[in-house]
Image (cartoon, rainbow, N blue to C red):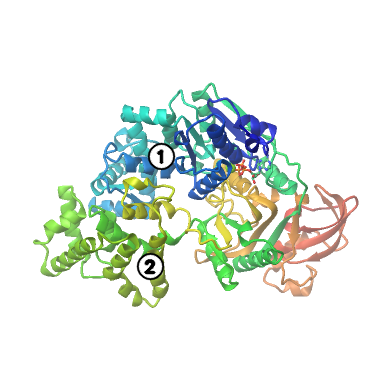
Amino acid sequence: MDISHLVDKLNDAQRQAVTAPIGPALVLAGAGSGKTRVLTHRVAWLVEVEGVSSQGIMAVTFTNKAAAEMRARIEHMLHMSTAPLWIGTFHGIAHRLLRIHWREANLPQAFQIMDADDQQRMVKKILKAMGLDEDRWIPKEVVWFINAQKDAGLRPKHLKDEGDMTRQQMIKLYAAYQDACERGGMVDFAELLLRVCELLRDNLDLQAHYRRRFQHVLVDEFQDTNAIQYQWLRLLVGPEGNPFVVGDDDQSIYGWRGAKVGNLLQFQKDYPRVQVCRLEQNYRSTANILNAANKLIENNNGRMGKNLWTSGNDGEPIKLYAAYNERDEADFVVNRIRNWVDKGGKRSECAILYRSNAQSRVFEEAMISARMPYKVYGGLRFFERAEIKDALAYMRLVHNRGDDASFERVVNLPTRGIGQRTMDIVRDYARANACTLWTAAGACLQTLGSKGGVSLHGFMLMIEKMDQATRELPLHEQVDHVIAHSGLIAHFKNDKNGGEARIENLEELVSAARGFNADTAVSEEAGEMTPIAAFLSHAVLESGEGQADAGEDCVQMMTLHTAKGLEFPLVFLCGMEENLFPHSRSVNEPTGLEEERRLCYVGITRAMKQLFLSYAESRRLHGVDNHYSPSRFIREIPPELLEEIRPRIQVSRPIYTPQAYSSSRNSKLIEETQNGIRLGQRVKHGKFGDGVVLEMEGQGTHARVQVRFERQGTKWLMLSFANLETI
Ligand code: ATP
Ligand code: MG
């Protein structure tokens, strides 16, 4: 057989990993060294050379986007359908298993997935029922506690309060939450994994079946697996199996959510026969970009250590832009992207990366006013918008009356005279009788006062009618019907504040349903589900990651976490400010700070050709103006790799003019002049040696000086970074 197409475009180390004899394997290597490429080639190799049936292969990764890309790459290599291959995210594959084995997993067939919002709603309800104060028991923190336990594989019965009253209460809350989920047939994200682990652990027949079936399980981004994911892998593969995992300890960025980079070491203990491969050549980035990343990450301790080099050329220096505020930053980015496109580049080659979702809004506004198509991954995407969740809650309730979270959400939306008093009675009944809200509502109809009772009865009749009317309809007509009869459209028509946009979104939901194909949705076991069930699950699983691809060429926007594993010719790393990045949560905490640095390493190494860093001198975020100093990560990049860009609007003006003194920032200016930096001043720079100041301009953190160095020629330097000493 001609296998040259499988190994031709690999270097020696990669080829060794791809063609390794069957057995457990670990590829431990830095960013852009071809780990994902090795993994996809390995799949093709197994099928074509080792003769493994594609039914026997499972490939796991972290995002749906990465999974889709992986599938496309393998399809391209194999020239055959990859449908029998199981490729997906941990959650997607767990979901698929539970859809097939709902009986064994002790779930109702129509079980539904809850997202973080549903979870919080559920917790609030429980707090209320238990008479606990939300100020003392913050719902978000309770959810966090519950998820952390599940991620560690722990049920309430495994937990000890250790004499700690707070912990004792948390455990009680977890138990009550879990009961409510079981009653309503609801499964949260962490539960998907935990449930599958328990299923495989307790059902030895199933365990044996899957171990026989999936002789080849491959995992990308292994450094970010948490306890339950690793346990899942162990159960699925078994001690005698042949897991093939690839990862990079320097890119471990989910420690805050329980990921254990130690799994890389544990794996080598659990599979003593493991073949460890290291890849050292980076194929993605220019030398400047790669060197910046290498230098930055050297500031971390306790790394597994690796050497990463490229044979490519230096490329452009990394550009640093100091913006006045967040809008200036966004305009700058839009302009640069426009230049890129004018020169024939694609918008989809440009990525805007930021630390937190809230930063996307300003960029979105700038994109909209520049009429530049864009796509946001992560953050508040389509399926997470309130009105979409309202409509989906109706759908879910029609589909499964036991869905308490949906019941709560829409019972009085739009308002139909079902007040808190009525709902309290229903909730009390549900709690006392351990039943769903729907059942409780039915039972309470008699006892409720006439007004509440009639309204509630009307609501229940409406849901029943919707169910009957939509049963035989195609999916998108079901959605259309439910939206039209729920009263949501009329409700939003009255809303002068963005109601119109909400109605458009609801209409968009009907189109989403029309375009939905249960057979190709990565995460679905199509045969096992009705289209509506598949669609609703898809809506929850997808909402982590963005809208369906309309095929339009658009700028890519996402958080650094979402960018893992991806690459783009042009990358903007924005908001490089202390307290934003590194995040304020982590600046005073060494392990947190190191994780932020790894995140920065991930960001830098996404760039192939050109990288821009930017920070804003003043930033309005969450409605407050902040003045943060530039991120320490900028300073950790060697200055010779950085080129500072003059702010566009700034006129060149000496730093010490009366004009500048009278500006609002003169305290800073005086400081700087007090530092002794003047025109003609002799200065010393750590890298470039001795020189003379030729020119000065800008103010505050924008202040720049031009220095003629004796050996290195003339350079513009940012005063706040250059650490110039006067001589
Ligand atoms: P990350 O750590 O960011 O996930 P990775 O190690 O998975 O990166 P890949 O995404 O597999 O790296 O590869 C990075 C880029 O280098 C891709 O564009 C890939 O096609 C290219 N590449 C990898 N190996 C080779 C090779 N031997 N020849 C040419 N290009 C290669
Ligand atoms: Mg990769």
For ligand 2, give the image quadrant.
Answer: top right
Specify few, some or many for label 2: CA neighbours under 10 Å numbering under 14, 14-19, or 20 or more: many
Tell me residue 566's x, y (percent): 59, 49
Camera-near label (1 vs 2) is: 2
Query: Upstream in the sequence, badge 1 or badge 2?
Result: 1
Specify few, some or many for label 1: CA neighbours under 10 Å numbering under 14, 14-19, or 20 or more: many
Q: What element carries label 2?
A: helix
Quick check: 249 left or right of 238? right
Q: Identify the amino acid type marked 1.
A: Asp
Q: Identify the amino acid type marked 2.
A: Leu
Which residue, as the protein is rendered here, is positioned at the far top? 273
Q: What element carries label 1?
A: helix
State how many labels appear: 2
At horizontal 51% and vertical 56% (from top left) the residue drawn is 377
User: Are the two marked residues, 1 and 2, in contact with CB atoms closer than 8 angstroms?
Assistant: no
Q: In which quarter of the image is residue 418?
A: bottom left
At horizontal 28% and vertical 63% (from top left) the residue drawn is 410
Residue 674 visible in the snapshot: yes
Residue topped by disc 1: 151
Quick check: 96 left or right of 453? right
